[in-house]
Image (cartoon, helix red, strand yellow):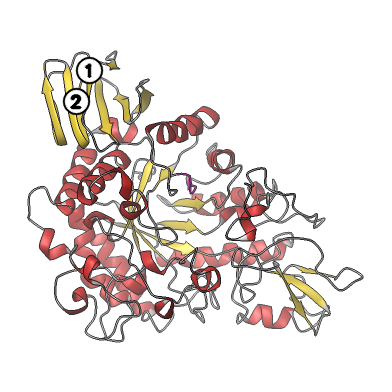
Amino acid sequence: MADWWRGSVTYQIYPRSFQDSDGDGIGDLKGILARLDHVAWLGADAIWLSPIFPSPMRDMGYDVADFTAIDPLFGTMTDFDALVARAHYLGLKVMIDQVLSHSSSDHPFFRESRGSRDNPKADWYVWADPKPDGSPPNNWLSIFGGPAWEWETRRRQYYLHNFLATQPDFNFHNPAVQDWLLEQMRFWLDRGVDGFRLDTVNFYLHDAQLRSNPPSPLNGPLPAINPYDMQDHAFSKSQGETVGFLLRMRRLLDDYPDRAMVGEVAEGIRAMALMADYTSGKDRLHMAYTFEMLSPVFTAGHFRSRIETFFAIAPHGWPCWAFSNHDVVRHVTRWAGHGAPDDLARLAAAMLLSFEGSVCLYQGEELGQTQTDLLYRELTDPQGLRFWPEDRGRDGCRTPMVWDGGPQGGFTSGRPWLPVKPPQLARNVAAQKGVPGSVLETYRALLGFRRAEPALIRGRSRFFDLPEPVLGFLRTWQDRALACVFNLGPGSVEVGVSGAQDLASPSQAARLEGERLTLGPNGFAYLAVPADAAIRT
């Protein structure tokens, strides 16, 4: 189907941490190939591979030195081709990360660009003169701390880096840069990939006038941990011209059948508006996601507002929702105050897989995996190293996948690049597979249920006005209506569901007596009901 991505479930693989095949402690393509059956067994539609390109790994692969090759750390192009072939045999689509906003400072184009102001690549990155006092051209800040400008003595200019100083930003105002990046994408499309996850898609274009950012209206009485969060990044990213490049990307993908893109919108103040803008119409991104559901907020009102807001401003757009990924604290830990870990993990799965839109799952999420508590000396992430201890960085969600209860959780025969600790070891695949009611088996059951229910894949949503902590909505498709009810709290709740006859499997801590539905702590239920059904307290 040309729109296979609509309502799809994508499983994110973090290659360094999925499976190591050669004992060096770092996951690789052969390891992913060996474990790919797990993803197919689980019931996902696609996999997304975080970066596997040659890189100095200062930002764990998000600093790309060659956009059309495989880093030897992960294997070879032959290994990649074998992985794609096996995935397609198993019925899985393959999406790969595209980190287009910047490159590594080791990229040959940047080495050339920084050498002088008049070389062929001089205008391929963002360069600016200093102010008369020698300071940077404006107040833009880097996500990893400090100014977003780094001095280059050879050019006597500053270059822009929204992330590390070793991640210089491409100049998308130069048409030649856009042309070249599209050709890098074409390389992988010709290689057989089914689409792309676009890293920081709203970072592509900056304000050509280099105007300074204003302060954020969300600033509180105390400074943020990271000064970056104290600005409204009105000029350093999220420019209107970005849509022009999205149109070009979509035209490229439309040359290939059945391909899709999902964009990461890394924005705080205008996240939903950008997500809507980037997916509205058939000539932009197929899907987009923000960090709106990757936050500590866990209320029925929050989840309802995000879904309703998106479809209100983008009725023809398409979201991709996620609760965890490689950049945030795992959601079972993030929302730990709202229930027992396994109950919360099952509830979160049921909610996410019921939301209108597409879904992305992060490796280990299906095990109810928790955040790993790391010591400072165990960190590799520049974010954690810079802002410790208030911000412990992203390594805690990137620790290895745990396959069994043996040494290193079956991930490697060597020493893993990040440690496998006892709390994570306890939540392993082998201990949960085939065990009724385990988090893993619940995920598989929910994925099977979603696949069999067109209302959950294509149906529209109608929310019911219910008091916290109850979230309830109706998903309808043609003559099928499904009531989805979730108790986000640690106590029992009771609601009435008109026209309810029986519970549809699966459920948790749910009991239906007549039209009265009782949900225990973190309980959830699906009920087949008439299209005009109501849920009330």
* x and y, in percent, of residue 113 in the image: 73, 78
Q: Is residue 115 above or below residue 252?
A: below
Please give the name of the residue rendered at 29% of the width and 13% of the height, measured from the top-left corner: 532
Write down the residue under mark 1.
497
User: Residue 395, located in which quarter of the rendered image?
Assistant: bottom left
Asked whether the residues under the numbered discs 1 and 2 touch, taking CB atoms below 8 Å apart as contact, a structural biologist would say yes
* x and y, in percent, of residue 475 in the image: 31, 27
Q: Secondary structure at mark 2?
A: strand
Please give the name of the residue rendered at 55% of the width and 78% of the height, measured from the top-left corner: 65
Q: Which residues are magenta?
A: 288-292
For the question of whether residue 273 can be seen, the reply is yes
Closer to the eye: label 1 or 2: 1
Please give the name of the residue rendered at 54% of the width and 42% of the height, measured from the top-left corner: 275
For the question of whether residue 502 can be seen, the reply is no
Observer-nearest of 102 and 442: 442
Please give the name of the residue rendered at 71% of the width and 82% of the height, measured from the top-left corner: 112
* Side of 480 relative to 100 (left or right): left
Of all residues shown, which one is farthest toward the right? 132
Q: Give the crowd class for mark 2: few <14, some 14-19, many >=20 residues within 10 Å.
A: many
First in sequence: mark 1 or mark 2? 1
Disc 1/disc 2 C-alpha distance (Å): 9 Å
* x and y, in percent, of residue 87 in the image: 27, 62
> What amino acid does circle 1 point to?
Val
Q: Give the crowd class for mark 1: few <14, some 14-19, many >=20 residues within 10 Å.
A: many
Observer-nearest of 99 and 78: 99
Q: Quadrant of the N terminus?
A: top left
On residue 12, the disc is none
- Asked if the stretch drawn in magenta spans residue 383, the answer is no
Q: Secondary structure at mark 1?
A: strand
On residue 527, the disc is 2
User: Residue 449, located in which quarter of the rendered image?
Assistant: top left
